[in-house]
Image (spheres, grey):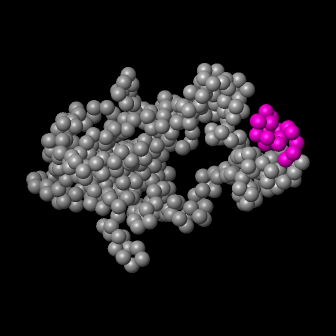
Amino acid sequence: MTEKQNGKSVRPALDGVRILDMTHVQAGPSCTQILGWLGADVIKVELPGRGDITRGQLRDKPDVDSLYFTMLNCNKRSITLNTKSEDGKEIFRKLIRHCDVLVENFGPGALDRQGFTWEAIQKLNPNMIYASIKGFGPGAHVDFKAYETVAQAMGGAMSTTGWEDGPPTSTGAQIGDSGSGIHMVAAILAALLQRTHTGRGQRVEVAMQDSVLNLCRVKFRDQQRLAAGPLTEYPNETFGSYVPRSGNASGGGQPGAAVKTKGGGANDYVYVIIQPQVWAGLAKTIGREELVTDPAYATPEARIKHLDEVFGTVEAWTIEHTKYEVLEKLNAIDVPCGPILSTEDLIDDPSLNASGMISTVVHPERGAFKTVGCPLVLSDTPVTIVASPLLGEHSAEILREIGHVGPSVAELQAAGVL
């Protein structure tokens, strides 16, 4: 499908690439949705009658696909298929021959047990890229199940998130599921590029634990730095043999904190980072110019000894302004800062809605809803988001495309194959 830009037809970046989407819940669907946004033809294979389990999870409207499903499965086509039946297996073989990439995030060995091992898939289609998202890579836990917070727990995120005297805490960002999905997007694109040189497909694997571990890279930097002594940029007073939870310390070597702003609400805060080069301007802006030359505050080494006092001084000024006013005033003097934006703030944000990062999509059954748009922006191939498919909406269409000969759609549906 071509898009129009400046009056010219532009082919989407992945036009002509066919994705056999055997994914469910979040990690896999988040990956294949981005591939669909980039122009690939994503054929989502679902169980007859039920489909992806998230169609019915956390519903806000009766008998309508949930937002959980609709926000993770835009720009796809749906075919229902029982791959355990003989007719279903034959249709699945044709889909394998028809497509370029198979993406799955079943439990370990699920497709193997149905006879669709990597070796069998290679024989059917030597060009196929077989992409698997699992909980864990090779090793002691390879057959274990993983969910979002399990991946955060075992990937290093939870042990380093939260306050020193509190329990390990998960982050609201889905770094285990959607984090694995975007890692898999990168792996699939690399495999597609490699195929242009070799003419062969290959096996591609991403583990959720590994993805979280990669996103915790700076904490493993600091784990090794502990051998040289305490991590002085952290607010913690004592250090053991591992990187501690450190509240809102930035992790970037510069002290930062969330300070209160006018309004007093749960999210009326701004996160402020104090770099050495901005201290003088910040002190003048908050009306404390004498701190520029005060020996107790003048240098980073001096300030690090009493950061609570430093940020308390900043907060005495920020609390007189809204978080958006603080954003404008501090950016004017190059102080890095960010207001704490709630989900309500973000879903109605004018800039995000104008850019399409918050997109309004019209679904044939639920009506209009908002979803998070594509974070990958290509100048020549803009993304158009279309609604997620109804269950089995494209079954007949896809069967025609793969050259299905045999029982009719109605007969296959009656037999429980579709």
Query: In the picture provided, is 233 more to the left or to the right than 192?
Result: right
Query: In the picture provided, is 292 more to the left or to the right than 110?
Result: right
Q: State which quadrant residue 205 falls in.
A: top left
224 lies above or below 415: above
Q: Main secondary structure of the magenta part?
A: helix
Q: Nearer the viewer, residue 318 or 104?
A: 318
321 lies above or below 106: below
Queried whether the magenta region covers residue 286, the answer comes back as no
Is residue 384 shown to the viewer in this render? no
Q: Position of residue 389 (x, y in %)?
A: 35, 57
Q: Nearer the viewer, residue 288 or 85?
A: 288
Q: Residue furthest left?
A: 406
Query: In the picture provided, is 8 more to the left or to the right than 236?
Result: left
Q: Position of residue 230 (x, y in %)?
A: 67, 26
Q: State which quadrant residue 84 falls in.
A: top left
Q: Which residues are magenta?
A: 291-312
Q: State which quadrant residue 37 falls in.
A: bottom left
Q: Residue furthest right?
A: 290
